[in-house]
Amino acid sequence: MSLLRTENVIMQFGGVVAVNDLNINIKKGELAALIGPNGAGKTTAFNVITGVYTPTSGKVLFTPTDKSGTATEIDITGKKPDKITALGVARTFQNIRLFKELSVLENVQVATHLNTDYSFLSAILRTPKARKGEAQAKADCEFLLERLGLIDLRNEKASSLPYGQQRHLEIARALATKPQLLLLDEPAAGMNPQETDELTDLIFKLKTDFDLTIFMIEHHMDLVMEISDHIYVLDFGCTIAKGTPDEVQNNPKVIEAYLGVDADVED
Amino acid sequence: MVVGMTMETFLQQLINGLSLGSLYALIAIGYTMVYGILRLINFAHGDIFMMAAYFTYFGIAVFFLPWYVTFIITIGLTILLGVTIERVAYRPLRDAPKTSLLISAIGVSFLLENVATYLFSGKPQAFPEFPLLTTPFFIGGLSIQPVSIVIPIVAFILMSALLFMINKTKLGMAMRAVAVDYDTAKLMGIKINGVISSTFAIGSALAAVGAILWCMKYPSVLPLMGVVPGLKCFIAAVIGGIGNVKGAVLGGLILGFSEVLMVAFFPALTGYRDAIAFVILIIILLFLPNGLLGKKQVEKV
Amino acid sequence: MNETQNSLGAYLKLHWKTAVFLVVLLIGIGLADIFVDSYMRRLLNLCAIYVIVSLAMNLVNGFTGQFSLGQAGFMAIGAYTVAIFTVPVESRTAIFYLEPMAPFLANIQLPFVVALILGGLASVVVAFFIGSPCLRLRGDYLAIATLGFSEIIRIVFTNTQSITNGALGIKSIPTISSLWWTYGTALLIIIATILLVYSSYGRAFKSIREDEIAAEAMGVGLFKTKMTSFLIGAFFTGIGGGLFAALLGTVDPKQFYFTLTYNFLLIIVLGGMGSISGTIIASFLVTLGQEALRFLDEPMAFGLDLPIFRPGLRMVVFSFLLMIIVLFYRKGLMGTNELTWDFMAQKFQSIKKKLSRKKTSTEGGGK
């Protein structure tokens, strides 16, 4: 069953076509990757899916499963990002966008706000319902921090964390929204091979433990080839290849696109 | 009221609207240029305008300098003031959170108002009349103050010169580049500080000319005279599309006309004259948030 | 982890310092209420009102990061509501001598508390109409729109003669003189703000201040959350305005000139954008400081007659102070920190350390 589909999505900025005719189909439970040289339009594609941009044309369709277990396809094209997140799509950012002045715990707690079922008045009055909600949210967040190895740092300012842990915090924060689909924008950027390996394991575990579908932009080819079920390759906004890691690796178009910008791939 | 209005009075109001609108346009350009480059509402701009009015007043009414000398000194001092403000109050905060920059702008505005009140007293000072410019002449049934004609002409000449500068000169190109992408422009070797200083210089010079013309039409000078025109002119810039010079001119004219015509058509609303700008602002923000000539802003993620 | 909030005893054990502090504070207010003279009483009342309005402003500007400059306007709404509804019916003909009060209002007189809350609610309604277009857009427009609103509301109140008595203003408002009104309200609002800020809503506010795009991506509805903060701020500010009217006993449009807003701006910048305790401290500092520096406005009567001291100097000093803080002490007194017991203990430790270091380096020396 498909969880996320895009139909002929085009994203144009003035005369520049950043994403041209994007058709992806991500099945529930799989791990898909989006690769391509720098400037290929990968992050733009993420921004269209998460509602940061409204596509010039085309559709984005998401099929979340509700509590009763029924799945319904919803047209999320051009919906506000917070609404899309509430439906079950969470993301991390390539250039790390943590709430710098807030503590590690607070960063994750913010992401539980969408599930608050009490009003601000109840929050001020600390009604039993509000207390219960706050306690539950806090427990959930601490559990996530535990999983991401950040629990001992929960009271530190987010900006004081080392780079790698900031990336982990981004993932914890995204998970706190209780997503069905997790979009990771270059989770391994700036990490050394060992850290990348650890991250690979972590992503894999989180995927199983939280019953996630993952769509990931990544430059580390080892990582991508190792864990992806499906790969989409973008170049100049166009999808030049898609398929399993093996299929993509042997695709001449992909090789050509990458050879031209070798330096960018390596970083 | 509406029925009672003759063609003559209507034309007369149009001329008034045109001259008020031109004054707004001159000041609005300063707002729009600074916002275009620094993304800052230069709250002090209205007070720079006020200071320029005082410079003129002192030159003519206190030191009895010839008018042309006064004008040159006024423009020079105002440019100096604008550039200094940027240097002292905005430049050190360029990498600070935007809120700090905004507070600094408000602080400068507040400081200028208070300094003016302290130095020149809060009482309005009468600006000497220029009979040559204020004695009305008659065309048909119209009585027209020459100043009402002079204002739009001066404004038009200055704005054309400015547009030429922005579109055809190297400095203009640099300004546009910085406005589009600050960081890239910096990387491309554009001297950001120079461009920003020039922007403040140009904006202040136009505000100075605006102040001189303003005083001829409304001959009274006081420390808070820049506040309401300042707010209105920022609104004019928003109406036209912030960051766009032509838009600022258009917005200024729209505001000038609507204000004058509202009072002319509905004398009962005279008391609400200053409110119309804000009503227009709210309407524009609701239906055309990027203004009439503005482009949609795309935020980088 | 179990919160030890089950019994009052356990709670007190955990927060005994705060409890003691509160008791001392209440006794202090009580004593002050009995002993201070009317000048000091008025000043202390003003401090409490400034605490309320500044806190509301900090909630919107400091915690949520939305730059609102409408404080004077919202205060005016609260103040006029209290004025209109609490002035005794029998004295209204004397007050509204130019044009009688509109018949639909002329005979309505409400108890102070009701009028006060009504004033807060009226601010909320107006705030909703300003916020609806502005909070959807880039933040900068809110500053200009709220400042503009402040001016409009003054224009409106000057022109609606039969409701607000125009430029003449409304006199003979029954005054409050007890400190309990202002300090009671201020305490309630401080507590409410603390509880709000340390809740899911408060974190949502702060997330918007930190990074709108990330906040939205984490499911925080920008418009709704900004609006919540803005409306709560307007409510508190309206209440502050109502107390202001009842403190002065008279309202007129000139009191609510937009420069009033700059006082609160100075306070929150001095105290720290995003610090509740900083705001409270700064409210007292600025209010009392403005009073203490009143001599700057008066020509020196003794010794050298310096022309430097004359009306306006005080405000020059204050605007200069604002500039100095913004340029050199951007975080103000507290930054986004709070004056908690832990914070004080830490500060105390670091000062002690510095002192002891100095002692060893300078060898001996008095204290």
Image (cartoon, coloured by chain):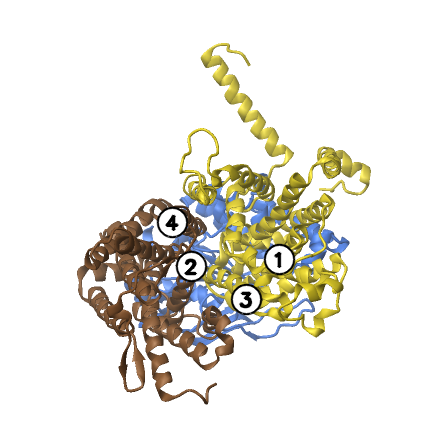
**Up-down relation of residue C105 to residue B68 (above or below):** below
Is C291 in front, or is C179? Answer: C291
Is C255 in front, or is A141? Answer: C255
Chain designation of label 2: B
Chain designation of label 4: B
Is A186 in front, or is B146? Answer: B146
Q: In the image, which disc is placed on residue C251?
A: 1
C106 relative position to A83: left or right: right
Q: How many marks?
A: 4
For discs 3 and 1, the disc positioned in front in the rendered view: 1
Relative image position of residue A84 (x, y in whole percent): 55, 67
Relative image position of residue C41 (x, y in whole percent): 67, 41
The residues tagged by marks 4 and 1 sit, at their Cα atoms, a distance apart of 28 Å
The residues tagged by marks 3 and 1 sit, at their Cα atoms, a distance apart of 24 Å
| Mark 1 nearby-residue class (10 Å; few <14, some 14–19, many ≥20) | many
In the rendered image, which residue does mark 4 sit on?
B120
Relative image position of residue C263 (x, y in whole percent): 52, 48
Q: Earlier in the sequence, mark 3 or mark 1?
A: 3
**Up-down relation of residue B282 to residue C78 (above or below):** below
| Mark 3 nearby-residue class (10 Å; few <14, some 14–19, many ≥20) | some
The blue-coloured chain is labelled A
Mark 4 and mark 1 on one chain: no
The brown-coloured chain is labelled B
Q: In the image, which disc is placed on residue B227?
A: 2
